[in-house]
């Protein structure tokens, strides 16, 4: 199995990524990490999945008109990722920032494979990316994640529900089946990519405390403190 390249030792920055099912609480936790580091005047940058302006319009149109095949879906998301990696992630790692990623390439490894793309093909697409210094996997029982998402969604979108896979004509049942398969893919990656598994059934405060302890143990945070001149800029 192909594994992402290790970040060269002479790169001063650190990369922290969060992964997990929709409804696992990962976005809340990485936001809290961001605020925690910012409050300490750390050099920190945040990036999130599927947010590149380069392909935003194409992605939106493709989803709206249901034009995306599993291969084009995978290629568009990889293009988005590559653009952000080249323009944001890699330069800021080289500049000595702590980069926080709300989902990383492992999202593609899970979702694209579930949609029918081969493991080796997807992993090869992302072979340019470096492995995060820390990857948190917020693990939550499937039914808990589904309840959190479905209770707040009056209507599921076509691709969000995995309707393109033909799993079920009912969007909610399709979503359940789709998320179950993604969950299985994440579990298969835990050891290979050295995920730090966080019990996402705990309170927000309990999870955040555990995350912070791991970050403090593995990253020399004082080294990322802004200099006085940078803080005033």
Image (cartoon, rainbow, N blue to C red):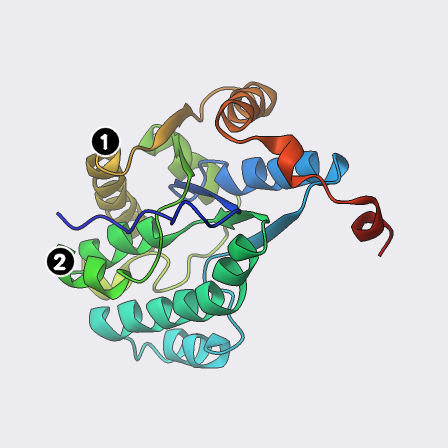
Q: Position of residue 215 (x, y in %)?
A: 52, 29
Earlier in the chain: of badge 2 and badge 1, it is 2
**Is the residue 85 above or below the residue 17 in the image?**
below
The answer to whether residue 69 is left or right of residue 99 is left
The answer to whether residue 118 is left or right of residue 225 is left
- The residue lying toward the viewer, choosing from 201 and 54, is 54
Mark linked to residue 120: 2
Q: Residues within 10 Å of mark 2 (few under 14, many from 20)?
A: few
Judged from the image, the secondary structure of the residue bearing numbered disc 2 is helix
The answer to whether residue 202 is left or right of residue 173 is right
Quarter location, residue 212: top right
**Which quarter of the rendered picture does the C terminus lie within?**
bottom right
Would residue 91 be visible to someone looking at this image?
Answer: yes
**Is the residue 156 above or below the residue 54 in the image?**
above
Q: Disc 2 versus disc 1: distance between alpha carbons? A: 18 Å
Q: Residue at x 42, y 57 (%)?
A: 156
- The residue lying toward the viewer, choosing from 156 and 32, is 32
Q: Which residue is mark 1?
A: 191
Q: Position of residue 20 (x, y in %)?
A: 38, 40
Judged from the image, the secondary structure of the residue bearing numbered disc 1 is loop
């Amino acid at each position: 199995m192909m594994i992402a390249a290790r970040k060269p030792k002479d790169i001063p920055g650190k990369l922290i990524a969060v992964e997990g099912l929709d409804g696992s609480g990962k976005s809340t936790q990485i936001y809290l990490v961001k605020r925690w580091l910012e409050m300490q005047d750390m050099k920190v940058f945040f990036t999130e999945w599927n947010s590149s302006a380069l392909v935003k319009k194409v992605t939106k149109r493709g989803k709206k008109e249901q034009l995306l095949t599993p291969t084009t879906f995978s290629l568009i998301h990889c293009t988005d990722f590559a653009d952000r990696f080249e323009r944001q992630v890699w330069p800021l790692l080289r500049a000595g920032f702590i980069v926080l990623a709300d989902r990383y390439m492992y999202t593609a490894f899970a979702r694209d494979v579930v949609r029918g793309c081969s493991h080796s093909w997807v992993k090869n697409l992302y072979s340019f990316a470096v492995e995060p210094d820390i990857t948190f996997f917020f693990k939550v029982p499937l039914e808990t994640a589904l309840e959190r998402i479905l209770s707040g969604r009056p209507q599921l979108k076509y691709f969000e529900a995995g309707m393109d896979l033909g799993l079920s004509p009912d969007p909610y049942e399709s979503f359940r089946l789709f998320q179950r398969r993604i969950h299985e893919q994440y579990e298969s990656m835990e050891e290979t990519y050295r995920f730090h598994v966080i019990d996402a059934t705990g309170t927000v405060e309990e999870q955040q405390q555990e995350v912070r302890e791991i970050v403090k143990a593995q990253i020399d945070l004082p080294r990322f403190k802004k200099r006085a001149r940078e803080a005033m800029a």
